[in-house]
Amino acid sequence: MTFLVVDDSPTMRRIVCNALREIGYTDVVEASDGADALEKLEQGSIDFVITDWNMPNMNGLELTKAIRSHARFGNLPILMVTTRGMKEDVIAAMQARVNNYIVKPFTPEVLREKINLILKTA
Amino acid sequence: MTTNHIQELLSKLNELRAVFILGQRAIPFIEEVVYFLREISPLLSEVNDSLAESTRKMPRASSQLKSVTQATEMATTEILDLIDVVLNDLDTFKKSWAAAPEALQTLQSQEEQLWQPLPESWNEQLQTLLGERRQHYATLQAMLESQQQLVDSLRERMNRIMLALQVQDITAQQLAAVNHLIESVRNRMAQLIRRLGSEVLDDLELPRQLFAEGTFDPHARYDRDGARQKQVDALVDALQHNASLPQDGENSGPASQDEIDSLFSSGTPTSQDEIDELFGGGTPASQDEIDGLFSGGTPTSQDEIDELFNPKRNDSDS
């Protein structure tokens, strides 16, 4: 299974990638913002998207909407991993049809739990 | 000269008297206003200079915050690199020693087999020796297991350190929010100074935004107790199952841009006319208003009228 990790912070990308490795997912592609992520999605076979919210060029919410409206990868599982934890943020993300939502700082246990939950219901 | 003429003359004299009285009352007031303006003028100039100076310094503060973010990001990258190296070393070490417990068991088993065919007369001595060797093998086995546990524990701790470095991303967003606030305040102050007519800042360009809005979360927090995640989980669950939404949790955070804007403008921005009016640019007072100011006072004495034409110099005037 190939993951696409989208975050403008190189630190966070490394941390998420390492957490994925620790829970057994070694095939990871990285993108620095929403626009970059869309390019990566066009290029390769991505099975799962983990995205931050606040990013330049195209934020995570816009990326989610763009993915959902795309013919080819519109049904990809999307997990939002962000510092934003306000009620209205979660509602907006769910309305944009993310599959689940993690607030930073996260733990690998929570990451594993959410990925399993998404894959189980997908 | 008729009685009417006399009455008109008296009326005019009364008006003239009123003008004198007004002048007499107004002069000290005007003098006070002049003194006040004289005194406040350096203060206003100082405030203006101070505003200009603070406004000038803000881009530097903003730039320093950006430098802090960059420095912490560099340091975090170095730490992450080192963690990667340590994790790789631990993996290599673990792999290289992975077969050791099994090899030790094989060795022990082979040794037991070797000792079996030896003469029974040696048995007592052999049993003692064999017992000691078994003890050594058990010790070695325990050491190997302990080593494996230690390596696993070190890996776990290294991963925890890596996870703790999420603080860099979170503080970077907090600094970006502070920086954005500084830039907003600076821009507002620059506008205010310009509206006050100062040319001090004419040479200053408003700074390019170091942190574009939307690239950071002003409410970013480093909470590790998992309470926020639980709230989010409850909300996600409710939304996924069309259930009623849970009660609001703590929703306080740093000021939003709207809140900052509202601090600086309660509705429409301050116009030049409004500023001018603060400094006395309003409509002149009517005669009635002036009369109102002085009505109810004591009648003007002849001395007061005389003083109008022969003003005494006050010591403080000089």
Image (cartoon, helix red, strand yellow):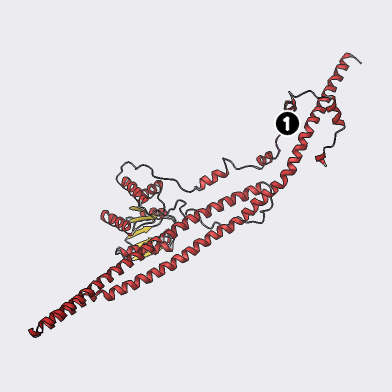
Amino acid on which the number 1 mark rests in the picture: Ala
At 44% from the left and 57% from the top, the residue drawn is B170
Q: In this picture, is B129 found above or below B83?
A: below
Question: From the image, which quarter does the N terminus of chain B lie in?
Answer: top right
Query: Which of the 4 image quarters holds residue B59?
Result: bottom right
Q: Is residue B58 visible?
A: yes
- Prevailing secondary structure class for the magenta stretch in the rendered image: loop
Q: Residue drawn 88% across and 14% down?
A: B3
Q: Which residues are magenta?
A: B279-286
The structure residue drawn at horizontal position 55% and vertical position 60%, both measured from the top left corner, is: B64
Where residue A78 appears, as percent x and y from the top left, is: 34, 56
Q: Position of residue B221 (x, y in %)?
A: 43, 53
Viewport quadrant of the C terminus of chain B: top right
Residue ranking furthest to the right: B1
Residue under circle 1? B285
A101 or B134, which is in the foreground? B134
- Quarter assignment of residue B40: top right
Asked if B94 appears above or below A30 in the picture, the reply is below
Seen in the image, is B208 located left or right of residue B142? right
Examine the rendered structure and indicate whether residue B226 appears above or below residue B125: above
